[in-house]
Image (spheres, rainbow, N blue to C red):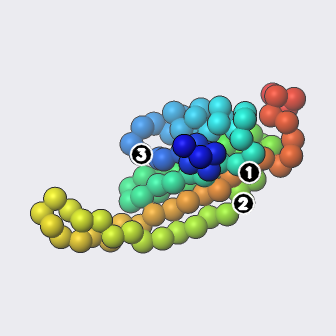
Amino acid sequence: MSTQEENVIYIGSKPVASYVIACISQLQTAEKIVLKARGRAISRAVDVAEILKRRFLKDIISIEAIKTDTEQIETNDGRVSNVSAIEIVIRKNGSNLESNE
């Protein structure tokens, strides 16, 4: 698995706190992470990014980019459905996480 794939966190149906903890631990070693979500999980991904930025890692991270897309998914009965998707790129500001905790 490449470094880029390891720094991607897929947001699903777990509680927001689970993803916040995953992001914090990933940012210990990575300079940037990418949150990816589709459909109903998009609001959860935005919540994770905002909680990280405003509460836990204030002044340590910034949101570098937000990309939106529409993906086509084939359902079980063979129909094609459009689903919204989002990618939120979060980068450390150059500060060392360990020194700011």
Task: Mark 3: give few (<14), some (14-19) or many (20+) Cα within 10 Å.
Answer: some
Give the mark, 3 or 1, whose residue is nearer the N terminus: 3
Given contact means CB atoms under 8 Å apart, are the residues at marks 1 and 2 in contact? yes
Q: Is residue 22 above or below residue 63?
A: above
Given contact means CB atoms under 8 Å apart, are the residues at marks 3 and 1 in contact? no
Q: On the image, numbered disc 1 is attached to which residue?
A: 91
Q: On the image, numbered disc 3 is attached to which residue?
A: 12
Give the mark, 2 or 3, whose residue is nearer the N terminus: 3
- Residue under the image location 87 percent in, 41 percent down: 95
Q: CA distance from mark 1 to mark 2?
A: 6 Å
Residue kind at label 2, given as amino acid type: Glu
Residue kind at label 1, given as amino acid type: Arg
| Secondary element at tag 3 | loop
- Residue 53, position in %: x, y? 71, 47
Tell me the quadrant of the picture where the C terminus can be found. top right
Residue kind at label 3, given as amino acid type: Gly
| Secondary element at tag 2 | strand
- Residue under the image location 51 percent in, 54 percent down: 36
Horizontal arrangement in the rendering, residue 27 relative to residue 74 (left or right) = right
- Frontmost residue, 40 versus 7: 7
- Residue under the image location 58 percent in, 43 percent down: 6
Q: Is residue 78 above or below residue 49?
A: below
Horizontal arrangement in the rendering, residue 25 relative to residue 40 (left or right) = right
| Secondary element at tag 1 | strand
Tell me the quadrant of the picture where the N terminus can be found. top right
Horizontal arrangement in the rendering, residue 48 relative to residue 59 (left or right) = left
Q: On the image, numbered disc 2 is attached to which residue?
A: 64
**Which quadrant of the view contains residue 25?**
top right
